[in-house]
Amino acid sequence: MFQRIEYQIITKSHEKQDATAGRYKTYYWRDKTGREVDYVLEKNGQLLAIEVKSNTDDSNSGLGEFRKQFKNAKALIVGEGGLKAEEFLQMKPEMLF
């Protein structure tokens, strides 16, 4: 299931919504201490950090640090403790921002 979510994140980030929407840029983020965020999407200067969680991994320290460093960024947890995977997979990319 979580491989499907990660594939969907990458796919969503590269979908062209309409002639004026353009594309999303996709990044992986890690700080000097090793805290990380699975995906960072950027569109028109807006950032969205996405952390994909399985049942066994409940650490969100990377997401918290990312939000400290990028104060205007939005954050989303997909999976355990956040948005249900099924809901995320049905969302349109513009709903994420």
Image (cartoon, rainbow, N blue to C red):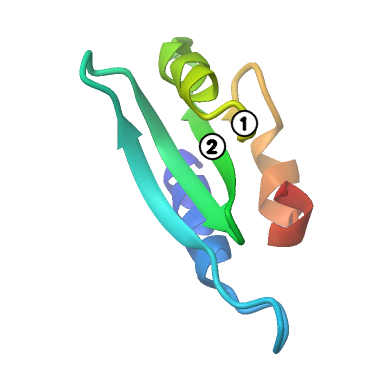
Q: Which mark is residue 75?
A: 1
Q: Earlier in the sequence, mark 1 or mark 2?
A: 2
Compared to residue 23, the image places residue 41 above or below, namely above
Compared to residue 42, the image places residue 56 above or below, namely above
Q: Residue at x 52, y 51 (%)?
A: 41
SS at circle 2: strand
Report if residue 92 is visible in the image. Answer: no
User: Which x, y percent locates residue 66?
Assistant: 46, 24
Q: Residue at x 44, y 42 (%)?
A: 39
Q: Are marks 1 and 2 in contact (CB under 8 Å)?
A: yes
**Residue on which disc 2 sits:** 50
In the image shown, does 14 or 66 lie closer to the viewer?
66
Tag 2: amino acid: Ile
Q: Residue at x 61, y 77 (%)?
A: 22
SS at circle 1: strand
Compared to residue 85, the image places residue 9 above or below, namely below
User: Which x, y percent locates residue 13?
Assistant: 53, 62
Answer few, some or many: residues within 10 Å of disc 1's Cα (few below 14, many 20 plus, some between 14 and 19): some
In the image shown, does 18 or 72 lie closer to the viewer?
72
Report if residue 8 is visible in the image. Answer: yes
How far separated are the C-alphas under marks 1 and 2? 6 Å
Compared to residue 37, the image places residue 87 above or below, namely below
User: Which x, y percent locates residue 25?
Assistant: 46, 61
Q: Is residue 91 left or right of residue 45?
A: right
Number of callouts: 2
Q: Residue 72's quadrant in the figure? A: top right
Tag 1: amino acid: Ala
Answer few, some or many: residues within 10 Å of disc 2's Cα (few below 14, many 20 plus, some between 14 and 19): many
User: Which x, y percent locates residue 68?
Assistant: 52, 17
Q: Which mark is residue 52?
A: none
